[in-house]
Amino acid sequence: MPGTLTRPELTAADRCDRCGAAAQVRAVLASGGELLFCGHHAREHETKLRELAAQIVQG
């Protein structure tokens, strides 16, 4: 896809934006922002993220 940046894989240093646990999921928002979530919070917010057309990438 032209203009798409390749995002690095999640590492042990990447933390959940909600609780600080190890991040397992990166949600890339249509607006260009991104959020990192642990598995628990990714499942909790998955419906809303899909409504926002976020691209969800498992780490």
Image (tube, helix red, strand yellow):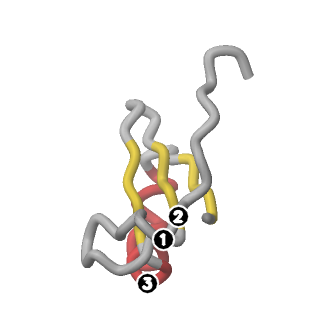
Q: Which residue is pictured at 37% across the width and 38% down the height?
A: 33
**Residue 43 screen position, x and y as percent:** 48, 78
Disc number placed over residue 12 in the picture, else none: 1
Q: How many angstroms separate mark 2 from mark 3 (CA)? A: 17 Å
- Numbered disc in front, either 2 or 3: 2
- The type of residue carrying mark 3 is His
Q: Label 1 crowding class (10 Å Cα cut-off): few <14, some 14-19, many 20+? A: few
Q: Which residue is pictured at 35% across the width and 69% down the height?
A: 16
In depth, the one of 40 and 51 nearer the eye is 40
Name above or below for residue 53 compared with residue 43.
above
- Numbered disc in front, either 3 or 1: 1
The answer to whether 33 appears left or right of 30 in the picture is left
Most distant residue in the right direction: 1
The answer to whether 6 appears left or right of 51 in the picture is right
Locate the N terminus by quadrant. top right
| Marked residue nearer the N-terminal end (2 or 3) | 2
**Residue 19 screen position, x and y as percent:** 25, 78
**Residue 30 screen position, x and y as percent:** 46, 35
- The type of residue carrying mark 2 is Thr
Q: Which residue is mark 3?
A: 40
User: CB under 8 Å between callouts 2 and 1?
Assistant: yes
Location of residue 58 (image quadrant): bottom right
Name above or below for residue 56 compared with residue 40.
above
Element on which disc 1 rests? loop
Location of residue 41 (image quadrant): bottom left
Q: Which residue is pictured at 58% across the width and 41% down the height?
A: 7
Q: Which residue is pictured at 38% across the width and 54% down the height?
A: 35
Most distant residue in the top direction: 2
